[in-house]
Each structure stands twice: as structure tokens, then as C-alpha cells.
Image (tube, rainbow, N blue to C red):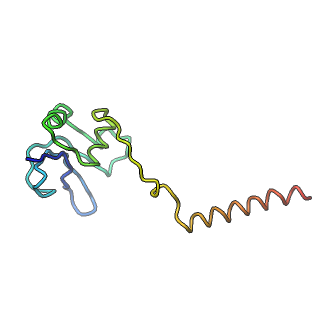
Amino acid sequence: MAMKIRLARGGSKKRPFYRVVAADSRMPRDGRFIEKLGTYNPLLPKDSEERVKLDMERVQYWLDQGAQPTDRVARFLEASGTLPKADRNNPKKGEPGKKAKERAEEKAAKAADAAEAPAED
């Protein structure tokens, strides 16, 4: 049985609330799970203690049993120090778009012109 540690969505429309669960990977996202391991409330501020709550003993048990965390859960576990930090590389994501590059070039050109103008006076 392929086990996953993943999020199961709860909460009402536009008010998400997630349970962190250990589930068979073949089960639906919000369907049957084996054990609830914690909660995640994305509406709370990032520095709030209540935002992510995990039962670390049970999470470690499921990791030892071979359960694979999803990407979001892996980030929670990295933040808590349970998993080593994974290298992620998406160089295109951090790069500005074409329009933003054009605006930056125009701004740089204006700044260069402004720097030269007072020097001539």
C-alpha cells in the first residue's frame, strides 16, 4: 500500500482549513484516511503558532513506515527540522516577465538621464 502524508481540505467556500493526514495514495483527497496527524490553517499569519500543528511522533512513525510527504507537507517538515532541506530549482519563476524587464530598462534610462542633467548645470 503506497502511503502519503498529505493535506485533506475542510472549511467552507473561500475559508480553507486543512487536516494533515496519513492516507493511501489511491484514496480521494478529502476521502478516507488512516490517521490525522495535524492541521494547517492558511488564513492565519505566517508567524502564528496555530498556523501549522503537527504530531511529530506520529509523523516520524509514518515516515519510518515509508510514507511519502507531498510537496507542501514536506515544506512544513523542513521548517520543523524533521526532513533535510531539499534543493528546489525553478530559475524561470523568479525571472521577471517581458513587460517588467522593459519597465526596468526605462526606469534605469530615466535615472541615468536624471543623474546626468544636474551634473551639466
Residue in the image at 16% along x and 40% along y = 37
Q: Is residue 61 above or below residue 32?
A: above
Give the left or right position of residue 63, taking residue 79 as reference. left
Residue in the image at 33% along x and 48% along y = 44
Question: Horizontal and vertical percent for residue 56?
Answer: 21, 33
Indicate the quadrant where residue 81 lies: top left
In the picture, the quarter occupied by the C terminus is bottom right
Foreground: 42 or 108? 108
Q: Is residue 58 above or below residue 94?
A: above
Question: Horizontal and vertical percent for residue 67?
Answer: 16, 42
Q: Is residue 78 above or below residue 11?
A: above
Indicate the quadrant where residue 85 lies: top left
- Residue lying furthest right in this view? 121
Residue in the image at 13% along x and 43% along y = 36
Q: Is residue 82 above or below residue 106?
A: above
Question: Horizontal and vertical percent for residue 74?
Answer: 28, 43
Foreground: 67 or 8? 67
Residue in the image at 20% along x and 55% along y = 9
Give the left or right position of residue 85, taking residue 107 as reference. left
Give the left or right position of residue 59, taking residue 50 as reference. left
Indicate the quadrant where residue 29 lies: bottom left
Foreground: 117 or 84? 84
Question: Horizontal and vertical percent for residue 13?
Answer: 24, 63
